[in-house]
Image (tube, grey):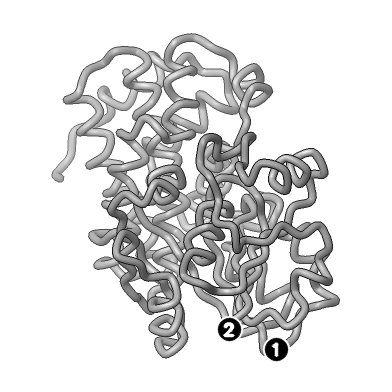
Amino acid sequence: MKICIIGGGSWGTALANLLAKKNYDVSLYIRNKELLEILNEKRINEIYLPQIKLCSQLKFISSVKECLSYTEIVVLTVPVQFLREALLKIKDYVTKKHVFINCSKGIEKQTLYFPSDIVEQILNVKNFAQLSGPNFAREVAMELPTATVIASYDMNLARELQYIFFTPYFRTYTSDDVLGVQFAGALKNVIAIACGISDGLRLGENARAALITRGLAEIKRLGKILGAKEETFMGLSGIGDLILTCTGNLSRNRDVGLKLGRGEKLSHIIQNLVMVAEGIDTTKAATKLAEKHNVDIPITSAVYNILYEDKKPFQALSELMRRPLKKE
């Protein structure tokens, strides 16, 4: 079986390495010439996944056409805000036989589309799945125990992919709630920024626990309006991913929040990011979705005010505490 990975960041590299170690014919598409040279010379992704020696069977390819030729499964790890651009580049080489599995997490801020919507609109393919869960790329690459969810409307496809990705250290579960898995994976990044801000302000562990819990409540509230299943939010792609991203030291979105809480400007933080923090753009998209459906999402709104209205972090979080009291 031939598998193509589109996206040479940390997650794409880790998944490509995982699949290559299972003896699949895996090609990792790399558009950055400097990174391609490094990978071919050292077999280490020094930019996005340093110190991890990659499987000798893994191939690095700079040609989209070559990458997709005879490929059965296409794994998408491109940040959601750049997914449309990436799909337009591969569109001419896509057939109805290709299976697409998206692994990035976010909502397109211009259209409010999820990855499944973008794939369907541009490629008009039905063979789609979403992989999401509490998965730091570095820990997967280090073969530390990890669990994840593969969601598809076609449960036969979900089960097929479940076995393809499964390893003794990477346990895979299936779901048919594609929207819920995508939504939970996107919104947890926003709550992680809030938790990072709280930690940066040294507001304590009680505050972080409250933000995670009430963050989950507003994710469920908006997600259910959109059609997601409530049980999805209590699983790996929901509460599991939320806890990891809000507390883990490898979380890019929490790190953005930490820096905001310590007084750094967003423009400076973005300028120095090596990898994309999806929560920044997802905050804007989620705010638009909530306004469209008239749903109250106070934590996300507070993060939006900090990111886009230049509100002081301490003031925004203090206002959360002073809202009118209500039943849980």
Looking at this rendering, what residue extends furthest in the left direction? 327
- In this rendering, would 192 be left or right of 34? left
Tell me: residue 270, above or below residue 99.
above
Which quarter of the rendered picture does the C terminus lie within? top left
Tell me: residue 142, above or below residue 113.
above
Q: Residue at x 75, y 65 (%)?
A: 87
Judged from the image, the secondary structure of the residue bearing numbered disc 2 is loop
Which quarter of the rendered picture does the N terminus lie within? bottom right
What percent of the width, then of the height, locates residue 61? 76, 60
Q: Residue 127 carries which label?
A: 2
Q: Residue 96 carries which label?
A: 1
Cα–Cα span, label 2 and label 1 = 8 Å
What percent of the width, then of the height, locates residue 252? 48, 34
What percent of the width, then of the height, locates residue 84? 73, 60
What percent of the width, then of the height, locates residue 44? 60, 42
Q: Residue at x 56, y 60 (%)?
A: 16
- Identify which residue, 104 or 16, lies in the foreground: 16
- In this rendering, would 47 be left or right of 328? right
- Amino acid found under the numbered disc labelled 2: Asn
Judged from the image, the secondary structure of the residue bearing numbered disc 1 is loop
- Identify which residue, 249 or 266, lies in the foreground: 249
- Identify which residue, 19 or 295, lies in the foreground: 19
Tell me: residue 211, above or below residue 175.
above
- Amino acid found under the numbered disc labelled 1: Lys
* Quarter of the view holding residue 138: top left
Q: Residue at x 81, y 57 (%)?
A: 62
Q: Do the residues labelled 2 and 1 touch (CB within 8 Å)?
A: yes
Q: Which residue is drawn at 29% across and 65% down?
A: 168
Looking at this rendering, what residue extends furthest in the top direction? 263
Residues packed near mark 1 inside 10 Å, few (<14), some (14 to 19) or many (20 plus): few
Q: Earlier in the sequence, mark 2 or mark 1?
A: 1
